[in-house]
Amino acid sequence: MQNNSGLETVRVAMAGNPNSGKSSIFNALTGSRQHIGNYPGVTVEKKEGMFREGERSVHVVDLPGIYSLTSYSQEEVIARQHIVESKPAVVVNVIDASNLERNLYLTLQLLEMGLNVVIALNMMDEVEKRGIELDVDMLSRRLGCYVAEVVGHKNIGIDNLKKTILKAFDRGGTETEVIYRAELGREVEKIVKELKQFKDIPYPEQFAAIKLLENDTEVVARLKRQEDSEALFNQISSSIHRLENLYGYPPEVLIGDRRYGYVSGLVKEITIRAPAIDRITLTERIDTLVTHRYLGIPLFLLTMYLIFWMTFTLGHPPMRWIEKGLSLLTQKIDSFWPSGASLMLKSLINDGIIGGVGGVIIFLPNILFLFLGISFLEDTGYMARIAFIMDKIMHKIGLHGRSFIPLLIGFGCTVPAILATRTIRSEKTRFTTIFILPLMSCGARLTIYLMVIPAFFPRSWQAPVLWSIYLIGILLALLLAKLLRKSLFRGEAEPFVMELPPYRMPSMKAIVLHMWDKSWQYIKKAGTIILAVSILIWILLTFPRVETKLQVNPPSGQQAQLSEESIRQKQLMESYAGRIGRIIEPALKPMGFDWKIGTSFIGAFAAKELFVAQMSIVYSIGDSETSPETLREVLRKNYSPLTGFCIMIFALIGTPCVATLAVTKKEMGSWKWVAIQWAGLTGMAWVVTTAIYQLGRLL
Amino acid sequence: MMKIGALSESLEDYLEIIYQLIQETKEARIKDIADRKNVSMSSVIPALRRLSKENLVNYKTRGIVTLTSQGQNLAARLLGRHEFVKYFLMSLLDVPEEIAERDACLFEHYMSPETFRKMVMFFEFVDTCGMNIRSHFEDYIANLDKQGDGEICPAPECPFKNDSFRRRQRWGMVKTLSSLSPGESGRVARVQADTAIRQRLIDMGVLPNVVITVERMAPLGDPIEIKLRGYHLSLRKEEADAIILYPST
């Protein structure tokens, strides 16, 4: 293949077990020339990159980490699909040399698919440190494919790997022959014979035959669609029956046994020297501590506390810089126009764009630090332990141990929390987690509570009220999770068969890349969808314009001095948002809200903390006097404590903010889910708030 | 762990009786023990003293007798052995129940561990070997009957039913992975899970004859961490329930 720069393009896919160090090799191979997107139709990350070697440009796709090539997990289906459909010229199989047996199990299957496999034997430093010596040439000869030794995170052996990839490309294939012996082999042969009559099977015949014996849903379905497949399926069921009778195990156990049997023989053969004693590794020593019966949970909580502390304490100064920068920008824009002129454009830029997008950008330092922490947890291997520790609780509500971290982050901000759900492997569990996340009361909502609670409740009540709001959120989340797992995301609980990988020192490069990637996603969101919605909300709040001549010709002496504040109030009342607020007032009434509260909630759609600002405008409290006390005074005068509580409950449950919706769309892949989530939560908010208000009035 | 045969036959019997009484009526009184052993209460006391000295029972002059964990362990093994021998005699050799029961009572105390192990292996072989030995055996037993007094086969049910694993579990020959404590290990006999989970377990290398060691439980008791093929894996107890092992000793 030739591309426009005249270079020959070689397409390569990278496959390997999770935790085999695949990403670090991918990073080392492609440097910063990466592109991260999604596989079509699903939300599994697809990483692509390229490098140049001589006269060729090599395009690399990093497949999701997999243990096998069955069709039971999304990652495996995607990896297989990619291999079948885009037919990479070379498949680089990254293998953790310190865990050869399980890693080579996948290798065998890749070879069986007839792929041009190159083995990247990773973590050779660790193997040497343990005093193990491997006969790499023998491995290469036995498997019939090229093997390159590498230490991914130290950039060792990468050049050799590049050369080996091209050597394999030039050779055009491996010299491997996977043979199944004895009865299994005979049955495989029989099925292969039947398969010969079908033309467009995308797999090598032997691989397909094995998959059919394993009753692989995808391959079976594909062949069922073929015409005249009856004889084939008769042969398959008779083969399965015969093997089961003969060996007492279903064929998939037999096949797995043969593969592992071959692999463990191979490992013995290539191990020249291995220390006799199985000494206690560092990982085991760390694990006795961090998964300790009594210390495990406190240590985890401490770790999370440290990460949150870092997020907020270290994130604070840069946040202030951004804040200052934004206000400086606002002033600059203010002074750019002579006072009074071009009010509209100025307001759009200052109130609409900077107000909306700026409100989101300001959290960027927090996001950076939070993902620095999360990447660290993930790359060291501690994340798997957290799932291990917390799974019992999460499993009770139909979620997975890995759901815990996102839920915890949700108390800070829902947006990074949704991004963090990527570590959950099952889609149903992941979607359920995303759905309930807005119920974890985020930091922005805290500003509302801090405004409202002191307005209505005596000091001794304040803490219990705040506590009860967080608790209501958590309880509703548990309830909703259970409900969702029984309705919208029904299905078997994800089996918890999870590797606890050895602890490893993460490479700084990988962590920074990961952090940058997540933050860039966040910035992109702020620049696109959030920008658009901010402008929309600004329009709703600004149009139609109120006649400014009010200011010039006061109709009566009473209003002779119309302050700027009352113009803003008038403006908001007459705006679309104000009108919508009044139109929907009947729907708000059962919750004890008037149109002013409703309108403020429309404004809060851009970011929850804007509710407070909106209320100030509705009650025409000027900038000069926006001390929290003035607003509280007004609230106290106009509403009952019950309404105050209802405001908080509605803010807690209903109308997730724009940023949340945008990220949900990205992570769940469809606006349909966004609509369901938004409507569902808002509906739930209405029901709960109404119930509380109506019950509260009876008391 | 105390070895079978270290105590006298009579003391081992006492231990089993106490175990059974606790299982049946939740407690073992001296009078009940005497009744079941068919001896006087005064001869129970010295036996209990002996057992107490061996740290197998908790016994105070008056009242209820309980088993220490060691005593419980030994009694359970004795009973499992008894039940296995009886079943072996009845199902494989077609010995009538009364005789099988009486012989099992003797075997359980005196049979050497080596013979017991070989008997177990033989039973395993007959039961799991796929080479149709099973039906050969059924023919054999049927013929035995005909050679005798010509009656119809006394065992209308096939002795090798699907629940054989549960039976072997009672005899202590197999255990589920979830019932092992941290530090214990075993060799996989089979995996009884749904297709999806089974395939996942196969891919992770949980296959017949693989040795699995339980490393620890999560702080809240579930999931568990196991070690196999040189790496660490965690499973929920419900998944570990489906993995059946021959415990290593």
Image (tube, rainbow, N blue to C red):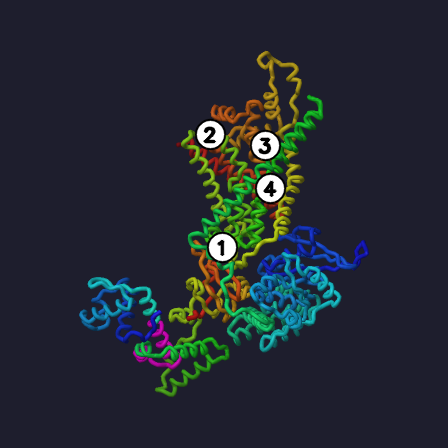
Question: What's under tag 3, amino acid-wise?
Answer: Gly
Residue at the disc numbered 2? A454
Disc nearer the start of the sequence (1/2):
1
Disc nearer the start of the sequence (3/1):
1
Q: Are marks 2 and 4 on the same chain?
A: yes
Q: Secondary structure at mark 4?
A: helix
**Which range of residues does the magenta coloring cover?**
B78-104
Q: Is residue A439 visible?
A: no
Q: Nearer the viewer, mark 4 or mark 1?
A: 1
Q: Secondary structure at mark 2?
A: helix
**Whether residue A54 is situated above or below residue A318 in the rendered picture:** below
Rendered location of residue A598, percent (x, y)? 55, 31
**Whether residue A560 is situated above or below residue B49 in the rendered picture:** above
Residue at the disc numbered 3? A603
Rendered location of residue A145, percent (x, y)? 68, 69
Question: What's under tag 2, amino acid-wise?
Answer: Pro
Question: What's under tag 4, amino acid-wise?
Answer: Leu
Rendered location of residue A174, percent (x, y)? 70, 69
Disc nearer the start of the sequence (3/2):
2
Which label sits on residue A661? 4
Residue at the disc numbered 1? A388
Mark 4, residues whose alpha carbon is within 10 Å: few (<14), some, or many (≥20)?
A: many
